[in-house]
Image (tube, rainbow, N blue to C red):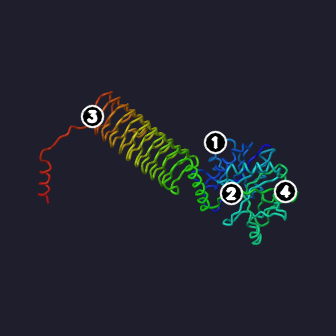
Amino acid sequence: MDLNVVILAAGRGKRMNSQTPKVLHQVLGRPMLRYAIDAVKPLRPRKTVVVIGNGADLVKKNMAGEDHISFVVQERLLGTGHALAIAKKEFKSGRVLVLNGDCPLIASGTLKMLSARHNRNRNALSFLSFTDDSISGYGRIFRDERGRVAGIVEDKHATPDERKKFKELNGGVYLLEEEVLGYLEKIRKNKSSGEYYLTDIVKMAAGSGKKVEAYTCPAEEIRGVNDREELFGVSEILKRRITRKWMQKGVTFIDPQTSFVGPLVHIGKDTIVYPNTYLEGRTRIGKNCVIYPGSRIYESVLGDGIVIKDNTVIEESRIGDGSAIGPFAHLRPRSIIGRSVKIGNFVETKKTFISDGTKASHLTYLGDAVIGKNVNIGAGTITCNYDGKNKFSTVIESDVFIGSDSQLVAPVKVGKGAYVAAGATVTRDVPSGDLAISRARQQNLKGWAKKRREESRVKS
């Protein structure tokens, strides 16, 4: 039967104390809502509807690219039952899976388990449950004398005796057949809260003789986020999951607690990751790499056998096998580094292609440049790529030697095998094999220092 998915994401999130909609708060660099969307994709739903309310336009903007999703706006936040009733108008038939947009730890495997058991037992309504005495705020499931699900009472409406007696908690993930969706019209507004509770359907369906089952799942998967402390809590759980996965795949973390690895990152076998490192976005690290402390790598691709030395920042760049970067280097976006390249201390690159075997060991800026193989870039070299209005390119062909403290004023080209003398300001192309010198002739004024000291004594 066709499956439709409804993700409830309209809550204000008052306890977050933020102008940002709750479901857009990030867990390891990704909005919470993205995790719920990703969790349902393997189920291949016919339609996925996200119910939004607070900051609706901002939520839509952040979910750009998710073309399979449709949004409905819950103008008045009248509860989960009301939200599902609005979403139901978006699909004509089929069963419905309902989950919350602020539960980023739910796993696709758990949702598949729920669906499989629902099908096998031919249930009209199935939902996830868990037990955890350390948390509150979740509805209490009560069963009849035969152990069958009889209903759910919301935590804020449960009596102390009910909280003590009923330890099984509602996970807030439901799978409902069409025959059960009809009960949405029968839900009555709760007098004290003014909301329509989706949980009321459970009691209605069970009371009508429909087959209703609750299936237990890991408590951590159901953990929702209502404040900053809970946001931190789910981030820590996910961070541990990720580092554990990569350690099982052959990656060494010197101190896993202080390494940040995003959920979309890939790390090759026998790579070593030191403390206080940040691997973010869709970064891919090859095999046998070493990432030293204090480094941050974002949306970049690193080959095999690469060494990233301390306190290096790499953004939206590519690095070939066997290269060494840092310490204190900054590869800005669109830097493409070849194989066996050395980018050293306090070197910055931007929108630059550097071919195999080239070295820029220290104190250098290379921007809007194309650099050939086996080039030596001396300390203090700058490609002067900006005239205040436009950016221009510098081309340095293979086997060139650039002396220290040189300025290459773009647009300019240094031909293959050419030399640029230390301290030169290059404003014209340098033909292959030539030496470019651009500096004043040195003069030594004999006795000048002694004369100056004598004049100073007279004045004093």
Callout 3 touching callout 2 (CB < 8 Å)? no
Q: Which mark is residue 437?
A: 3
Q: Which mark is residue 65?
A: 1
For discs 3 and 4, the disc positioned in front in the rendered view: 4
Callout 3 touching callout 4 (CB < 8 Å)? no
Cα gap from disc 3 to disc 2, whole angstroms = 71 Å
Type of amino acid at the residue the image marks with label 1: Gly
Cα gap from disc 3 to disc 1, whole angstroms = 53 Å
The kind of secondary structure element at disc 4 is helix
Residue 398 shows in this picture = yes
The kind of secondary structure element at disc 1 is loop
Cα gap from disc 3 to disc 4, whole angstroms = 88 Å
Is disc 3 surrounded by few (<14), some (14 to 19) or many (20+) residues within 10 Å? some
Residue labelled with disc 2? 218
Cα gap from disc 4 to disc 2, whole angstroms = 25 Å
Closer to the chain start, of discs 3 and 1, is 1
Type of amino acid at the residue the image marks with label 2: Pro
Question: How far across and down, in percent of the image, does residue 297 sit?
Answer: 49, 47
Closer to the chain start, of discs 1 and 4, is 1
Query: Does 400 sit left or right of 72 as displayed?
Result: left
For discs 3 and 2, the disc positioned in front in the rendered view: 2
Question: How far across and down, in percent of the image, does residue 346 sit?
Answer: 38, 47
Quadrant occupied by the N terminus: top right
Question: How far across and down, in percent of the image, does residue 318 sit?
Answer: 48, 39
Closer to the chain start, of discs 4 and 2, is 4
Type of amino acid at the residue the image marks with label 3: Ile
Query: Does 263 sit left or right of 345 as displayed?
Result: right
Quadrant occupied by the C terminus: bottom left
Closer to the chain start, of discs 3 and 4, is 4
Type of amino acid at the residue the image marks with label 4: Ala
